[in-house]
Image: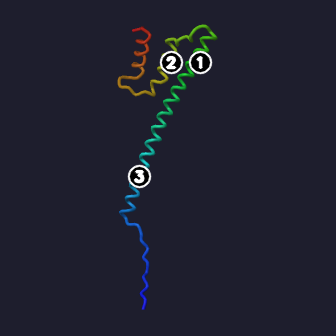
Amino acid sequence: MRVQRVRQARAFTLVEILIVVIILGILATIIIGLFSNGTKDASAASLKDNLRSMRSQLQLYVAQHGNYPALATFEQQMTYATMIAPKLTIQGGTTEILRGIIARGLGLR
C-alpha cells in the first residue's frame, strides 16, 4: 500500500510580508529624497539662468541707449510699497515700515 503525500502550498507569513513592506518604504524614502535634491538644484540653475538673462538684457540696453535705465522716483516706490503692504504681515504696521525703509534708502530721513 502506497501512501500518497499531499503537497501543501507554502504561503508567506505575516512577518515576511511586513519586512518586505518596510524595505520598500525605506527605498521609496531614499528615492524621494534624491528627487527633492534634484528639484532644488534645478531651481538654483533656473535662477542663475534668469540672472544671466537680465545681465545680458541690461548690457543690450546700455549698448543701445548709452546709459543705464533710470531709477524709480520716490512716488513710484511709494505706490509699489502700498501695493505690497497689505500682503505683508509685519508687526508695527506694514505701510509705515515700508515707507521708513524706502525713505531711509533714499536718504530722506
Q: Secondary structure at mark 1?
A: helix
Mark 2 residue crowding within 10 angstroms, few (<14) / some (14–19) / many (20+): few
Q: Exactly how many numbered labels are in the figure?
A: 3
Vertical side of 47 occupied by 72: above or below? above
In percent of width and height, residue 68 lies at: 56, 10
How far apart are labels 2 and 1 at the CA level? Answer: 26 Å
Number of the label disc, if any, that sits on residue 57: 1
Viewer-nearest of labels 1 and 3? 3
Viewer-nearest of labels 2 and 1? 1
Q: Secondary structure at mark 3?
A: helix
Number of the label disc, if any, that sits on residue 25: 3
Vertical side of 40 occupied by 57: above or below? above
Number of the label disc, if any, that sits on residue 75: none
Mark 3 residue crowding within 10 angstroms, few (<14) / some (14–19) / many (20+): few
- Amino acid at the residue labelled 3: Gly
Residue at figure coordinates x 42%, y 8% from the top left:
108
Q: Earlier in the sequence, mark 3 or mark 2?
A: 3
Residue at figure coordinates x 44%, y 74% from the top left:
9
Report which residue position mark 2 lands on. Answer: 79
Q: Secondary structure at mark 2?
A: helix
- Amino acid at the residue labelled 2: Thr
Q: Earlier in the sequence, mark 1 or mark 3?
A: 3
Quadrant of the image containing the N terminus: bottom left
Tell me whether circle 3 and circle 2 mark residues in contact (CB < 8 Å).
no
In percent of width and height, residue 87 lies at: 45, 28
Viewer-nearest of labels 3 and 2? 3
In percent of width and height, residue 19 lies at: 37, 58
Residue at figure coordinates x 52%, y 11% from the top left:
73
